[in-house]
Amino acid sequence: MKKLLLLFFIFISHISFAKETHKPDTVSVGFYINSIHDIDFMNKEYNINLWLWLKYKNQDFDFSKYLEVPMAKTVDKSFYTVDTLADGRIYMLMKLQCVMKDAWKIQNFPFDRQKLRFSIENSQYDSDDLIFRVDTIGGHYSKLAFTDWNVLRDSFKISTGIKKYETNFGDPTLTQPHSEFSNYKVQVVIERDSWWLFLKLFIGMYISFLLSYLCFFIHRDNIDARFSLGVGSLFAVIANKYVIDSALPESTTFTLVDTLHGFTLCFVFASVACSVYTLMLVKTNRLEQTRRFDRSASLIMLIVYLVLNGWFIYNACHVQLV
């Protein structure tokens, strides 16, 4: 009986020791963003310039070789230095310049908010060997880091987690197509100072609408001029939309740009249709009815157009999809 108890305690001690020896090493990570620039909507990417530092004990981790930035198109380690701390840990400081790929939300452009994400992993060591820990001391970005954008209050989030891959990456020692790697994640939500950009982009559309609106104030004797203004405004609105669309990625949803141009086209077409009806009244010598119709139609169109613009722009500014 004593031998059985002894064997049992030896077995338990062996399991505990095995668990202790397989405890993953901890890597403390911190960063400081110098700049985020060249935000390219068409190609769905942006450039980030930052300092990254790591503190760890296991020399085999060697982040100068095995640092992985999963969402990056290109990673340039322009500078790094390695030192040994008093407690024996390795301290590595590196400067990274990355071109990051991301998915932009353009439903409310130019009143949009964008979520920028940055994460790192070690390409050689999984979560059984390496776990990241957040180093939160100090600030994390320069005040000049975000050109033409503002960081949304309380949106800067730093976290660590486990990234799961449903593959064994061809490793014959793994029997299941499943791998787990520790990752370090940074997320920030930014919004732009949009009103001047909005005016610059849409001023052509609004001038086109006003030109078509002037049809109601042209005397009925110049009916040709009314038609010319209306038809010219239609082409001007379409051209303005093509110019804005050329700077944005393809979208399967109906965006604010589509909405504003869509109903502006409808109103321009309505002004042309009103001119057609006015011509019919003139041909039948109903001149007084023509004046009343122009007055009523111009007032109704202007009020409805302004209300619709205000409603859609308000929703774009206050209802954000992030």
Image: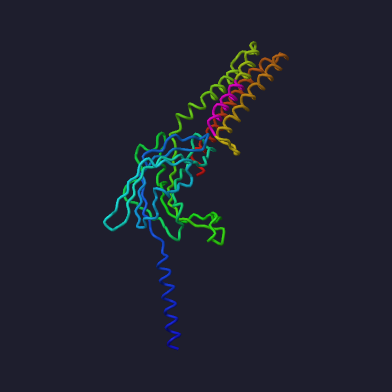
In the image, farthest residue toward the top: 221
Determine the residue positioned at 42% across, 72% down: 16
| Nearest to the observer: residue 104 or residue 134 | 134
Q: Is residue 277 left or right of residue 138?
A: right
Q: Residue furthest front?
A: 172
Magenta-highlighted residues:
233-248
Which of the 4 image quarters holds residue 87? bottom left
Q: Position of residue 10 (x, y in %)?
A: 42, 78
Taking the spot 57% from the left edge, 19% from the top edge, the residue there is: 211
In the image, farthest residue toward the right: 284
Q: Position of residue 181 (x, y in %)?
A: 47, 55
In the image: residue 306, left or right of residue 186: right
Q: Residue 209: x, y in percent?
A: 57, 23
Q: Nearer the viewer, residue 278 or 161?
A: 161
277 displayed left or right of 206:
right
Q: Taking 295 as reference, is 169 above or below it?
A: below
| Image quadrant occupied by the N terminus | bottom left
- Count of picture labels: 0
Judge whether 50 appears above or below 246 on screen.
Answer: below
Residue 225: percent from the left, percent from the top? 62, 13
- Tell me: residue 306, above or below residue 89: above
Q: Residue furthest bottom?
A: 1
